[in-house]
Image (cartoon, coloured by chain):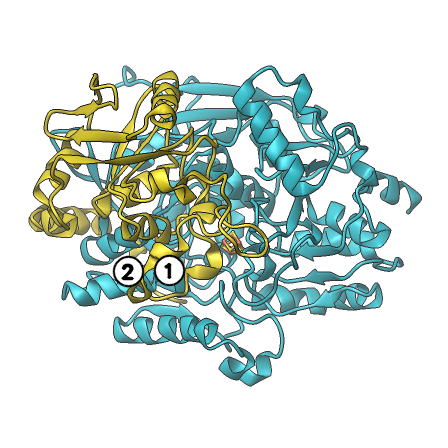
Chain colours: A cyan, B yellow
Amino acid sequence: MGTEAPKTIFDRIWESHVITRRDDGESLIYIDRLLLQENSFHAFDKIRRENRKVRNPGQAFAFADHYVPTRDRARGLDAIADPEIRNMVELIEADTRAYDITLFGLGDIRQGILHVVGPEQGITQPGLVIAGADSHTSTHGALGAYAFGIGSSEVAHVLAVQGLWRPRPKTMLVDVVDPLPAGTTAKDLILAIIARIGAGGAVGHVIEYAGPGITGLSVEERMTVCNMSIEAGARAGLVSPDDKVFDYVKGRPYAPRGEDWERALAYWRSLPSAPGAAYDRRVEITGGEVAPMVTWGTSPDQALAVTGRVPDPAAEGDADERRRMERALTYMDLRPGQDLRAIAVDRVFIGSCTNSRIEDLRAAAAVAKGRQARVPAMVVPGSGLIKRQAEEEGLHEIFLGAGFEWREPGCSMCVAINGDGLQPGERCASTSNRNFEGRQGRGGRTHLMSPAMAAAAAVTGHLSDVRDLLAEG
Amino acid sequence: MDPFETLSAVAVPLEQANVNTDQIFPARMIKKPRAVGYAQFTFHDIRRDDAGALRDDFPLNQDKYRDARILVAGVNFGCGSSREGAVYTLLDSGFRVVIAPSFGDIFAANCLKNGLLTITLPEATVADLRKEISAAAAPRLTVNLEAEEITRPSGETLAFEAEPFQKHCLLNGLNEIDLSLEFAAEIDAFEQAHRARLPWLAVEEG
Ligand code: SF4
């Protein structure tokens, strides 16, 4: 007693999920929940081809989100004109029916983006190991779960085995030592963190976010932070759960209840990292210095405070990095030294698993209220339930009154595979998570930012410092 | 999965760092069934210009590298989306080995499941290898997984370290699910104890 080294939350979750270890040091880790989406069809094909049984269908949940239309939902599948896209939505319906897996599908009020609906339904809980058929599964770490994305072969492996082989990852503590200033958001914080550690800076690590700059955030804001862990190369990001998380989970459809709730709560309270626990790496972030951020390049780490200027590759000493910057500027059609706030946009997208929750919509609506969009702008709620809540709060009327489109839930223009997308050369202010070349449509140019900043871009027609608009009232 | 034999093949250098899976295999192609053959999609958008014509400055489009089966890439190759199509498309194009200073985590795991060997070497070594391949008239490498050795165009050899389990699976062409199911008794026992300890894990909608 008392001699054991203090543990991190990750240590505790990992150690309680090791089924067995192999000679080479890899462990077979038990997977509590598996999250699927339309692109999981390769995994079901593999299961069928190899004639496997799905071990625990009740522990898998599927979501129609990547390919669903964001308009005309009353027509159901008929709203999808492209037969290949329609086929994707039909496949997930057929596969989940065949293997008796719960689907949050088209026509279900609970339908939405997997990383929004999982927490919203109480499927995501502290202490769980969650594998998802999508790299942004790290989102679920906001509730104190170890959650990570996997490819289709591993999805098939989890379906058949309920476990995955893993070397024990390293841990990285991102300590946000003070709160964020007024007018900045969780999105600005995570963009600042990624800019600091780099797109590959956390490869092989699980990030734990901690400190007053994190505990001060709501659970939804923590999801925004954990969501983009993958953009720094980390497969997972998590936060030690606290009362905010327990209150968030309580009463949700899949949350424990009654006596189970009390037992779960006692267990969850034992999870947070102990003071003095060891991490392989530590990074300190001064939250108070974070300003509203935008990306200028084609990788999420190419981000700056909106008050800055497009950087000059010539000032970069490292030749590889210089080439990378030049390529990004060419693709983005930007010049070194340009004032970021002078960059005009063609379109605005508010949505995605990073920023489509109710708080995001409220923040965008607060900026849109009483103003008019100067460029086409669309708002895509993260789930049907969020959409309904927003409508109860009258947010849709604010958006519609300001000339924004109010769409149905799904991934939409975050990945542009459902038919919503940019035209070549179009420039978009987007609340999503990837500004990769072609991500929002071939030749499209993406600037990542927070919902309030995207709304500010919509009503001014260019990248803008939302603090200036908020000061106007 | 076919066992990995010693591979002697053309290698193609790709200078760029942080090549993501959207660049390897654009998202809009994911919905295509594998049966259509994914080779046509490999690096689709970055190897073509806006009009859809092949760009001369993209190495894979050059005659010298036409039959490449080994890719020598930059840091953080395969970052971004978890889409396994990025691996299928490389395999369908004939690739069996990717050499890079580092890989996107999920991409590397996906490679292993599909018999695509990933080799991690120090950044300077990989840069040097890319340079040598670009300069060589016959840009061939020989990758001997058993011996953990690469033979360069110059004839010199370069040692690498393979992860032992990956090596075992690749050399024998093993199916990972079959191997894992050999632990069925351990999985059953673990699951029973886990559910007893955390009884609320049983999934029920309230
Ligand atoms: S919203 Fe974007 S990042 Fe999130 S799950 Fe959908 S496609 Fe992936």
Task: Kindly indicate the quadrant of the structure image that contains residue B96.
Answer: top left
A447 vs A176, nearest the viewer: A447
Left or right: residue A83 versus residue A30 is right
Q: Position of residue A451 (x, y in %)?
A: 70, 49
Q: Tell me if label 1 and label 2 are in contact, CB under 8 Å.
A: yes
A40 vs A57, nearest the viewer: A40
Left or right: residue A121 versus residue B90 is right
Mark 1 nearby-residue class (10 Å; few <14, some 14–19, many ≥20) = many
Amino acid of disc 2: Ala
> Please, which chain is the residue tagged with disc 1 on?
A
Can see residue A216? no
Q: If you read the primary sequence from the N terminus, does the residue marked by circle 1 or circle 2 appear first?
A: 1
> Please, which chain is the residue tagged with disc 2 on?
A
Task: Kindly indicate the quadrant of the structure image that contains residue B147.
Answer: top left
Secondary element under disc 2, as helix, strand or loop, is helix
Q: Position of residue B89 (x, y in %)?
A: 34, 52
| Mark 2 lies on residue | A43
Position of residue A260 relative to residue A465, above or below, is below
Secondary element under disc 1, as helix, strand or loop, is strand
Task: Kindly indicate the quadrant of the structure image that contains residue B123.
Answer: top left
Mark 2 nearby-residue class (10 Å; few <14, some 14–19, many ≥20) = many
Q: Residue at x 64, y 62 (%)?
A: A380
Q: Position of residue B164 (x, y in %)?
A: 15, 30
